[in-house]
Structures are given as structure tokens and as C-alpha cells.
Amino acid sequence: MIKLGLIDEAGVAAVREQAQTAMAAATAELLEADPEQAGKRRIRPELWPDPGFVDVGLRGDASELDGLTVADPLDHTGGWVDTKFVDAVAAVMDRRMAEDPRIVVLGEDVHRLNGGTNGATKGLAKKYGDQTSETGRILGTPISENAFFGLGGGLALDGRYRPVVEFMYPDFMWVAADQVFNQVGKARHMFGGDNPVPLVLRTKVAMGSGYGSQHLMDPAGIFATAPGWRIVAPSSAADYVGLMNAALALQDPVLVIEHVDLYGTADRVPEGDLDYILPPGRAAVRRTGSDVTVISYLSMVKASLDAIEQTGVDGELIDLRWLDRASLDWETIGTSIRKTNAVLIVEQGARGTSYGAWLSDAIQRRFFDWLDQPVQRVTGSEASPSISKVLERAAIARTEEVVAALEGERRGMGAR
Amino acid sequence: MAAVIRMPAALAGVTEGAIQTWLAQAGDTIAVGAPLAEIETEKAVVEYQSEVGGTVARLLVEAGDNVAVGTPIAVVLAAGEGDDAIGPALAAAGLSAEPEAPAAAAPAAAPAPVAAPAAVQAEAAGDRLFASPIVRRLARERGIDLTAVTGSGPEGRIVRRDLDGAQVAPAAAPAVAPAPASGSTDVPLTGMRRAIARRLTESKTTVPHFYVTAHCNVGELLELRKRVNSAIETKVSVNDFVLKAVAGALRAVPEANAIWGGDVIRRFDTVDLAVAVAVEGGLLTPVLRGVESLTLTQVAAAVADAAARARAGKLRQEELEGGSFSVSNLGMYGVDEFSAILNPPQSGILAVGAAKERPIVVDGQLAVGSVMTVTLSADHRVIDGAVAAQWMAKFVALIENPVAILA
């Protein structure tokens, strides 16, 4: 820098002195003479935190949702508009971007192919511009998840923007694991809980699409190990609207899980309303029953419903909607377990990264005295789904696997 | 080596026992054979004598606690050992019990055919009772005895549905209503109370009872008793006469001196009679042996001794076993008549009321006489109506002609 003429020797000395003065001032605030060891200093005892502070600030308290309009599609009495699920995805993002200029979208191909690989950002680039424009908000990125997710994390910490990052396939979280888990997932807690990280990560479960072992995971189980993250997994378009609105309003990083099987389904949303939120702690009972509490999310909600009808086992089906520890609806789950005394957790993906493992642990801990048989789980196989159509099907769970598990529940109930 | 004392099988066939009283305390030095504790089982209180000598280091079970046979109840230190020997001894007791567990569990671990959830006896895999958590919770709340429930779940596990069945079954224990805030008190069950509840429920619900009643003119008997009691020192009671008359009737009608054995009827050569003795908290039925060959005064002495020891909790188990017949006398309470529940496996019980002055007919004329009403409860599997009638006729003949009893 001296060679470039940006600073001279005296300037360097002045910067050094400035830094040393600042450090001395800081240590003078924090340290005192150690009365037990002459000549040593120690941190002033009153500055140490209370051990009870250990988990403070893992996430926000969601008070930022206060005052927003809560509406559960379960209770909607007005009119409905038919829509494809994926069109509701694009529509609610459009609605929020129109209302909130801070929102920017980052991801591979989000600006082209008429809304990315599946149409989830359809029409947005045309309306809000892409990375070629100085004011563009739909930013197509190189294939570099760690980089562009890190960019999103920085934007969120800065606070002037509200980044919505898309991972084309959930498995790419491993590429970006440092930014996803080590930075964004821990940032609020690391700095005392006072700096919010408002970021939305969208990704789609693609089991059944044939993209093979490195593209077909369900990320819920892994994200559930990172307490800074909130997780939603909507099973319907109307839930998606409410959950995405809540995700975009929260001051925490939120993973929004979508599923390719749901994108094309004919669905519906409340007429003329894309602004309601579904706050944390709101599961939905999709079917009431007395034999077994079936807990699921995303596309497996429908598979579970079909399996219940096929077997005739009187299952009570709970659609979790919010999946992370802090946002789970324990009241709905507990009420159901006290009634049925049996639990089946249904998910589609590989056993190793399964979401249900921690949930079954928590359930047996909370409701041991209410269980009539072990908590059972439907998952995929050990292996990641292969590119072979046959092996992919064998590696994942669908309705047939839920049917088999419900028959197991029936045996577990004993004889009439 | 410090010794771990385990709850003994104080009586044949018992599976659990309670320490009624510790007769030695921690710190006491005891010799082999010294009384260590009084152990209460369903049927009796038994004094347990130590099989080891040394210093009682620790009592592991509180007085009143009911524990399974084999449960460690105390640690006794050998001479020269200190308290530091307690831990290793307990650990050794724990360890020595361990190797059995996997062996017992092994058959249960074998994969069962998944599609065939046949009802399996819940205890098939050993002593461990397999019941789901909600079943244990409900059993606790409703007072259901799970050992009586058959599990229909995987590996014979008792599941919620099995309990729903148990509730409607007639033999199931009635649900205990939650205690209201005031106005009632729940008294914990003693082993004896549990035994009475279980055995008599079983008797009344599974044994086909029928009843035969007779009114006995006991004028002569009362007169004879007065003369006997004025002549000799031992006082005999009306009940002693009744016992002798029962024995005489059983000798005369040997078909009645028998019990139901499942696939046989067992007839007895001698007359062993159980006498119901009311004790604090319940009743006991000590058995008098060979009553037919005892004199009246011997019967009186035997009854007095058995009753005294019953009230003191000093009866031995063998004194409570056997017999084909019981006598239950509530005459001293002024009861006119009643019918009794058979005391399994006995096939007869005679319920004896008070001797009272009542109108009787003598030679076609109304008169006042002393009448005692007795009711025989009989097990119809063993005793038919005609046999019961013959027996009763013989009994009445003896009671109304009591000199024959003395013969």
C-alpha cells in the first residue's frame, strides 16, 4: 500500500497506535487485577454470563408476526380459486415482492426457463428484472451454492434486504453446508441473539423424478438438527401461501420445502387473499380417527390419507406444516396421542437423514405413559434413490409403504 | 464376604411377601437362627430366622413394603468387615442375577411370525410381564390386576384392547373410583385382604354353590353342655359340639368328606375341619386334624389354641392348609341364620347361627324350645343334593341327640 502511495510510514504507525489504544481501552473495561495471582489480570467476575443463557437467542421469538393477519385455510369459509400448486408458489412471491421492495431472489435459472426448472418463479424476472439490470431482483446465479447462499446470508445479516434463495435440489445443501449451517444457522445465537437473520431458503424434494442419488433427499431431518433454522413443508397450495408469508415475515432463516409431485396438482387458494399467515405451532388434522396418530408432511400427507382409506385402519392424520423443534404443534400431537395411544410417522426419504428419528424420540419422552405400542416410522430405504427407475421406487416410500405400516399398527393393537 | 439376604419364599408357592416387622436393626449382631424379621404373606405371618450370622449392615426394605420373593432385603456383614463391603456385596448380588436375564429373554427375542398374532400368555417369556405403557397406566388407575390379563399384542404384550376386555369380564376387579376430596378414606389392602378378595371372588364365581338349611332343636345340647361344664374344668362351647357333630356326619356320609380335584374327586380318610376365626383385618381358617378321633375337650382345647395363635399371627402355613370342610359360627353375634361362601378347595361349609328360644311343635302342640339354624353350602361338583340332605339329616340327628356325640 505504501508502494501504491495509498499510505505512508507515519500513516501506518498512526493506524497501529489507534488500534492499540482501542484494544487497551476495551481490555481496561473487561479486566481487573487478579487478587489471587499477583501480577495477573482476570476477567471481571460480574461480566461472565449466567449459565442459563446457554440457549438464549437460538432464534427469534416470532413476535414480528404480531399484528399480521392469521388465517387457516381449514377455517376458510369464503370463495376459492382453482390453481396449480406451483402457480400459487409464484403468485405469493409476486405478491410479497410487490409489497416488500427488500425481497430479492437468488438461485440457479430462477430468472429464465419461464420461472426456473419448475415454474416456481414464473413471471417474476419479467416483472422485477434480473441480474442484468441494476435494479433487478430475480438474480440468476452460477452453479455455486456455497457462494450464492453465503451472499444471501450476508444480505440477511445486513438487514436492508430480504433474500429468498433457491436450491434446485436439496442435496446441494451439502455443497453450501458451511454457509447454511455454520454461518446462517448459528449467526443469531453466536452474537447473543440480537441480530436477526431474515432469510428464506426454498428447495424441492424431487423423489420420483429420476435425477438420482445426489438430487433426491428430503432435507427436513438434517435441517431439524440446526436449531437456528425454522422449517415449513406445505402439503397444499393454500397452506403454502400462509406458510411462505410467515416465512418472509419472520426474522429467522426459514427452510421452505416443496415437492415436485405437488407442483402439478390441481389445487386451490382462498379467493382474493394472498396476505394471510399460518404462524408456527399450527398443525392441521386432516382426518380424525381413533386407532393411530399418523404424523406426516408435504406430499406424504396425501399418501397417508390414501393408505388410511385403503386399510380401514382408523388413523388420525396430522399434517405438521411446521417441522422445527421450536415451531412444532405439540398440543395437536399430544391431544391425538392421548386418544389413540399409537403413533406412525410417515416420510418419504432415506432412513439415515430421516426427520422422524428425532420426533419419535421426543414423542416417547413426552408421551411414554400414553403409548400402547412403539412409535413406528415409514421412511425410504437406507440408500439414496438411484437413477434406475426401479431402484428409485424401491428406495422411497409411497402409499404402499404406508399401507404396510398401518397393517403393522393394526397387529400392534392386538385382538378385539 | 458380606451376605445379601433375599425375601424368602416363606410359604410354599408364595411369590411375594412383606416385612411386617424387622426383628433386627442395622448395627445389631445376629447369630445363625436368630429371628430377623416377621414376614407377612397372603395367608400368615411367619418369623424368618437368619441363615447367616454377623452384623446387620443395612435393611433394604421398609417394614410394610411388599416385594417379590428373591428381592434383596438386607445386607449382613461377616465378622471384621466394614461398611465398605456393602457396595461390593450388592453389586455382586446384582451381577449374579444378571446372567439369568438374557437366557430367559432369548426365546422372546426369536422372530415371531408377523402375520400370526396368536394370543400368547403374557408371562410366557418368564416373570417379566409385557404390557404397553398405557396399559400399565390404566391398570394403575383402574386397579386392574395385569397378571390375570392375557396379552394379544406382539409377543403376547398386553395392549389397550386387552384391558378393554378385562373391564367387562365379570371377574375383573371393579374400578376404583377417584377418591373425593372429603367423606371417604382409601384403606390400603393388606396381603390378607387381597387373599380374601381373590379367593372368595374366585370361589363364589367359579364354584357351583347350593344351600341346605335345617333348624335344630338344641334344648338337650344346651342342657348337656351345662352339665359337662359343671363337671369338668375345661369349658366346652356349643361350637365344639357342632364341630364334633360335623365330624360325625362326615364319617357317616363319606361322600361328603371330599373335594374337587379337577379330574378326580378326592375323598379323605380322616376329618380335617377348618374353623373360621375372625382376626383383626380379616379372618383365618386354621384346620383341626382328625376331629373324628378327638374328644370334645380336646376339640375345645385345639380350637382355643388355634384361635389364640391366629389372633397373634403365629399360625404356621401348614396349619392353614387342607381339610374338606369349614365351620363358620356367627351365633355369638346373635345372628339367626346366614349362608357362607366355600373356602376353596373345600366342598362344604356350615354356617351356624345363634341358639334362640323359638316356637316349636312337640307332639302336635306348640311349645317354646331352643332352636339353632344351620345352613350348609356345598360344592355341587362333589356333593349332590341328596348327599347333602343325608349329611344334614345325620348332623341334625347328632346335634339333637348330643349324647351320641360324647360316645
Image: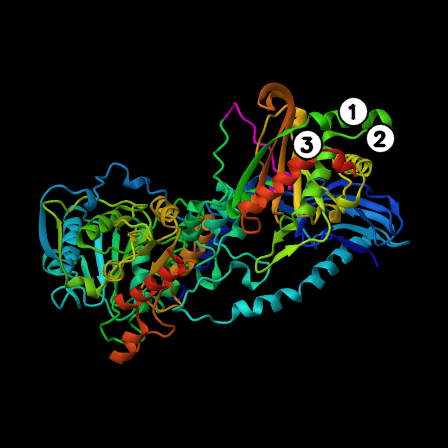
Residue sitting at x 79%, y 30%: B236
Q: Main secondary structure of the magenta part?
A: loop
Q: State yes or no: residue B188 in magenta.
A: yes
Circle nearer the viewer, 1 or 3: 3
**As drawn, is A299 to the left or to the right of A355?**
left
- Of all chains, the one bearing label 3 is B
Quarter of the picture containing the N terminus of chain A is bottom left
Quarter of the picture containing the C terminus of chain A is bottom left
Residue sitting at x 67%, y 67%: B99
- Of all chains, the one bearing label 2 is B
Separation of residues labelled 1 and 3 (CA atoms)? 15 Å
Q: Which residues are magenta?
A: B181-194
Q: Secondary structure at mark 3?
A: helix
- Of all chains, the one bearing label 1 is B
Camera-side residue of A282 and A170: A282
Under mark 1, the amino acid is Lys
Under mark 2, the amino acid is Thr
The residue identified by callout 3 is B400
Q: Secondary structure at mark 1?
A: helix
Which tag, 3 or 2, sits closer to the chain's start?
Answer: 2
Separation of residues labelled 2 and 1 (CA atoms)? 12 Å
Tell me whether marks 2 and 1 sit on the same chain: yes
Label disc, if present, on residue B226 of the rendered structure: 1
Separation of residues labelled 3 and 2 (CA atoms)? 22 Å
Label disc, if present, on residue A213 of the rendered structure: none
**As drawn, is B76 to the left or to the right of A127?**
right
Which tag, 1 or 3, sits closer to the chain's start?
Answer: 1
Label disc, if present, on residue B234 of the rendered structure: 2
